[in-house]
Image (cartoon, rainbow, N blue to C red):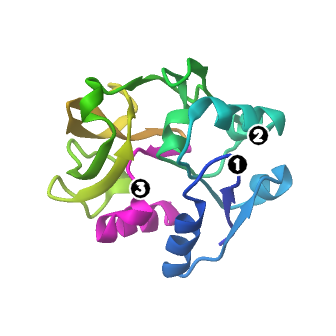
Amino acid sequence: MDVAIIKYNSGNIQSVLYAMERLGVKASLTDNPEEIKKADKVIFPGQGEASSAMKYLKERNLDQLIKDLKQPFFGICLGQQLLCEYSEENDTNCLGVFPIKVKKFPPLDKVPHVGWNNLENLKSPLLKGLDDSDYVYYVHSYFAEVHPEYTIATTHYLNDFSALLHKDNFYAMQAHPEKSSLSGEKILTNFLNL
């Protein structure tokens, strides 16, 4: 299986590469459009700031490329937020795959949200083998709002937010599956099996 991990202006890429290795998959880290287009699966990881990440994607025409991909695609953390239409983080227009706004948690003394929380309202083959007793690891200050059609799991921290999203070939997760022990491993395995 050919898995491409999109290289862009974000952190956390190395831990995703290690997670793929643990699952027996050799993934390539690339910002080459041809390599990304021919991959069987694409992972869009991320930790960082929305506007500078979008600037990097646009400078390399990766913003349009991502929207046009047809193979299973998995956005993680900032990767999920960038798939939404807009982020309050530095007033950023994002990729618009999901018609969802990304907002900052109030109040400021509770931000960032760091730690383990359970998933609720699970509904997707991506979450096969998981239920609301499964916990995943979060580090974030911004969240995607809950959408009636595209939210496939929620988490509650100060308010409910989209823990995972799905539309067509696009899947996305706010938590870090690569840091979420067995729960995260199941989600990554399910994605690779789509």
Question: What's the residue type where badge 3 is placed?
Answer: His
- In the rendered image, residue 3, in percent from the top left (x then y), is placed at 65, 65
Asked if marks 2 and 1 touch (Cβ < 8 Å), the reply is yes
* First in sequence: mark 3 vs mark 1: 1
**Residue at position x 38%, y 32% from top?**
143
Numbered disc 3: secondary structure: loop
Is 2 or 15 nearer to us in this picture?
A: 15
Numbered disc 2: secondary structure: helix
- In the rendered image, residue 49, in percent from the top left (x then y), is placed at 56, 36
- In the rendered image, residue 22, in percent from the top left (x then y), is placed at 49, 80
Q: Which residues fall within the magenta stretch? A: 169-194
Labelled disc at residue 71: none
Quadrant of residue 62 within the rendered picture? top right
Residues packed near mark 1 inside 10 Å, few (<14), some (14 to 19) or many (20 plus) = many
Q: Which residue is mark 2?
A: 62
Is 89 or 70 nearer to us in this picture?
A: 89
Identify the residue at the far top of this view: 91
**Residue at position x 32%, y 70% from top?**
181
Identify the residue at the far left of this view: 133
Frontmost of labels 2 and 1 is 1
Question: What's the residue type where badge 2 is placed?
Answer: Leu
Quadrant of residue 60 within the rendered picture? top right
Labelled disc at residue 176: 3
- In the rendered image, residue 168, in percent from the top left (x then y), is placed at 53, 39
Q: CA distance from mark 2 to mark 1?
A: 9 Å
Residue 94 against residue 189 in the figure, above or below = above
Q: CA distance from mark 2 to mark 3?
A: 22 Å
Q: Which residue is mark 1?
A: 8
